Image (spheres, rainbow, N blue to C red):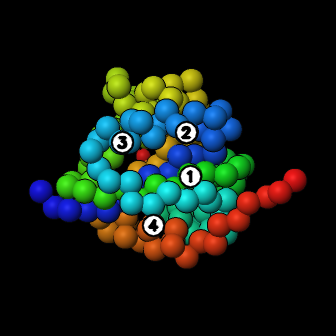
Amino acid sequence: MPFERTLVIMKPSIIKRGIESELFLWYRQTGLNIADVRIIHPNIRWWKDFYREHRKKSFFPKLIKFMTSGISLALVMEGENAVQAIRTLNGATDPKEAAEKTIRATFASDGKLPDNAVHGSANVKDAKRELDLIRQHRSYTHVR
Ligand code: GDP
């Protein structure tokens, strides 16, 4: 099986609910290595670029509004077959359709799209592009 890197994002709702540590346990149980963790709070322009394949979709404005609503956590995961392993663990895009014991079924079951708790890169090519975007993003935190 190929060694791969993929990007996981714990979306703002997970951080607001304070349950990120629970998700870390799930991701650790994959046996993949968590190579990097970053707090990110990108602006509208960055998220529009990140999700540009969806820019013509009717849900795009809601998606961007949700993703800019707070901080997210970006995890760089690496190991054998990492992309598919994470996609399987995350579950289907719509939490109502996600299989039992997936992250989306467990942690976003009451949520309505676009809130499905987490992101996982769709394939190796997308993962490379998304990881480049994360590397270029300059994280900052608000001190209120
Ligand atoms: P993913 O690869 O499973 O994240 O799914 P996609 O790449 O198709 O969609 C990107 C993100 O857009 C999803 O994770 C959701 O947050 C959001 N999204 C996808 N489909 C819909 C939809 O039909 N309605 C709404 N409101 N949001 C959606």
Q: Earlier in the sequence, mark 3 or mark 1?
A: 3
CA gap, disc 3 and disc 1 = 15 Å
In x, y percent, where is residue 4? 26, 62
* Residue 129 seen: yes
CA gap, disc 1 and disc 4 = 14 Å
Q: Earlier in the sequence, mark 2 or mark 4?
A: 2
Q: Earlier in the sequence, mark 3 or mark 2?
A: 2
Q: Is residue 26 left or right of residue 9?
A: left
CA gap, disc 2 and disc 1 = 8 Å
- Tell me whether circle 2 and circle 1 mark residues in contact (CB < 8 Å): yes
CA gap, disc 3 and disc 4 = 21 Å
Which residue is labeled 1 in the image?
73
Amino acid, disc 4? Glu
* Crowd class of label 4 (few under 14; some 14 to 19; many from 20; radius 10 Å): many
Residue at (57, 69) in percent of width and height: 49
Q: Is residue 143 left or right of residue 34?
A: right
Q: Is mark 4 within 8 Å of ligand 1?
A: no
- Up-down relation of residue 100 to residue 127 (above or below): above
In x, y percent, where is residue 101? 35, 25
Which residue is labeled 2 in the image?
20
CA gap, disc 2 and disc 4 = 21 Å
Element under disc 1:
strand
Amino acid, disc 1? Leu
- Tell me whether circle 3 and circle 1 mark residues in contact (CB < 8 Å): no
* Residue 43 seen: no
Which residue is labeled 3 in the image?
28
Amino acid, disc 2? Glu
